[in-house]
Image (spheres, rainbow, N blue to C red):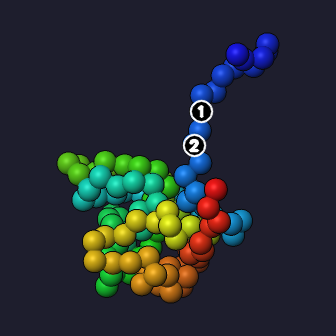
Amino acid sequence: MVAQGFTDQGETTADNLLAGEFPRVAMLATITGGNYARGTVLKQTNDVFTICGASDKPMAILAEAVDASSEDKDAVVYLSGEFNANALIVASGATVAGLTEKLGDRGIYVKTNQAY
C-alpha cells in the first residue's frame, strides 16, 4: 500500500558493489566485446572499454549492466571510488587480487565488505 500523496517508485536491491565513501567519479563510456554485469573491471583500448584481463591495465568499473556483444553500447563507468572485491568481475584467467594494486594506482580502491 502506498501512502496518500506518494507514488510507488518500485524496488531496489543492494548489490554490495560500493564499499566506502571515497569520491566516485563517473562518466559515459563506449563498451565493446561482450555482455557485462555491473562491477566488471574494464580496460581501455583507444576510445572503447572492454573486460580487463590479468596483464591489462584496469581503467574503470562498470556501473551498470550492458550487452555490447553484438554492437558497441554506451554505459556509465566509475573512474574512482571504493569497491567490494567480492562484487568485482574480471576476465577468465585474471583475479581481483592480481589487479588490486593497478586499480589503486587509478584511484579505484578494493576492499572487502562485511557480508549482509
Q: Is residue 11 left or right of residue 92?
A: right
Amino acid carrying label 1: it is Glu
Residue lying furthest top: 4
Is residue 5 at least partly visible in the picture? Answer: yes
Residue 110 image-quadrant placement? bottom right
Q: Residue 113: image x %, image y %?
A: 62, 67
Callout 1 crowding tier (Cα within 10 Å): few <14, some 14–19, many ≥20 = few
- Residue at 31% across, 85% down: 55
Secondary structure of the residue carrying numbered label 2? loop
Nearer the observer, 96 or 9:
96
Q: Residue 7: image x %, image y %?
A: 69, 20
Mark sitting on residue 11: 1
- What is the spatial separation of the Cα atoms under label 2 and label 1, in whole angstroms? 7 Å
**Residue named by callout 2:** 13
Nearer the observer, 50 or 93:
93
Nearer the observer, 59 or 92:
92
Count of numbered tags:
2
